Amino acid sequence: MKHIIYFLSAFLFFVQFAAAQTPIIFQPGPGLNDGTDEGGVNGGKDVFIGDADNITHGTENVFYITPISNCNATTWITLFKFDISTLPVEVDSVMLVINHTNPGTYCYSNCVADFHLAAITEPWSETTVSFSARPAKESTPFYSILNHNWNDSLKVKEYDITQTYRNWATETIPNHGFEFYSETVGCNNAAVVLYGPTSDDTTSAGANRPYLKIYPTSVGVQSSLAAQLGLQVYPNPATNYATLEFTLAAAQNIVFELADVTGRLINTLEYPLAAGTNKLSVSLRDVNAGLYYYRLKTNAGVVSGKLIKK
């Protein structure tokens, strides 16, 4: 038995190490833009809004962010949301990747500004949000671009959003997305502007849309919560069925989710379970061979890991 445990531990470490070198790319595409999109693979959620017209721009293929103008109505901000509910909870790092458009050819005023990303704290809709009725956000940004000059080309820029992603994934804070904005105040006259494609962009087959680059954690299912639950997943790799064995402190409903490497949800199962040791048998008959990610939601929290179908 010890030899089997050592082999499984070594195998899981190898799989996790390999996965850490090859990130998951989660890149939402156009949705219905009717208020139902929540940032899933086929339901991108992003919108820019400004004081010039005070309406939502949720179907545009580009976004705009400017400093705050005190001389004209040219202030723009952008809201984004990625639905990470099918993605790994435990990660080494997560990068938000945006393909910024090159800057303009001149600037007269408000040519240098600071730009920030801050978590949104309440729900919002692509169809009803406006500049004057936008959702609240946290007062402290989780990422900042300081002293960005009008002719600085960001091109493809990666923003480290690891801690905020973890907060969303563990439901420490609700995931309502984030606001990309500036608090620099001045007169916008051909000012510094951040541009970029949205999830509705169709050029280059959508390759330039914003996306998340996710590096799953190197400790995987050996997390403190998994240890608390005594979670075991076997066999792994599996052929037709995999078993999850764990212990619950009290009777409760648990949810099991299985997603592919793109974050697409394959299966969701809910079970009412008793306190004590429980075993779940999960069918893999209808999925192709490959790497998958599971999430087990319990009253104690959410734990995730990798599951291989051979």
Image (cartoon, grey):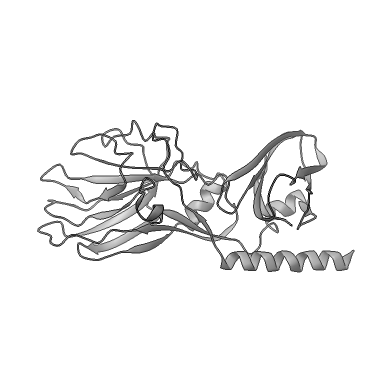
* Residue 152: quadrant of the picture: bottom left
Front position in the image: 309 or 166: 309
Q: Is residue 183 above or below residue 253?
A: below
Q: Which residue extends farthest right?
A: 1
Which residue lies at the image location 28% right of the left edge and 58% below the top edge? 101
Which residue lies at the image location 44% right of the left edge and 46% below the top edge? 29
Give how far across and how far down residue 107 sits, in percent: 12, 60
* Residue 138: quadrant of the picture: top left
State which quarter of the image contains the N terminus: bottom right
Q: Is residue 147 left or right of residue 174?
A: left
Give how far across and how far down residue 19 sits, in percent: 61, 64
Give how far across and how far down residue 225 sits, in percent: 69, 51
Which residue lies at the image location 59% right of the left edge and 65% below the top edge? 20
* Residue 255: quadrant of the picture: top right
Front position in the image: 124 or 63: 63
State which quarter of the image contains the C terminus: bottom right
What count of labels does the image hold? Answer: 0
Give how far across and how far down residue 74 sits, in percent: 17, 45
Which residue lies at the image location 21% right of the left edge and 51% below the top edge? 67
Front position in the image: 102 or 239: 239
Q: Is residue 178 left or right of residue 184?
A: right
Q: Is residue 55 above or below residue 115?
A: above
Front position in the image: 161 or 249: 161
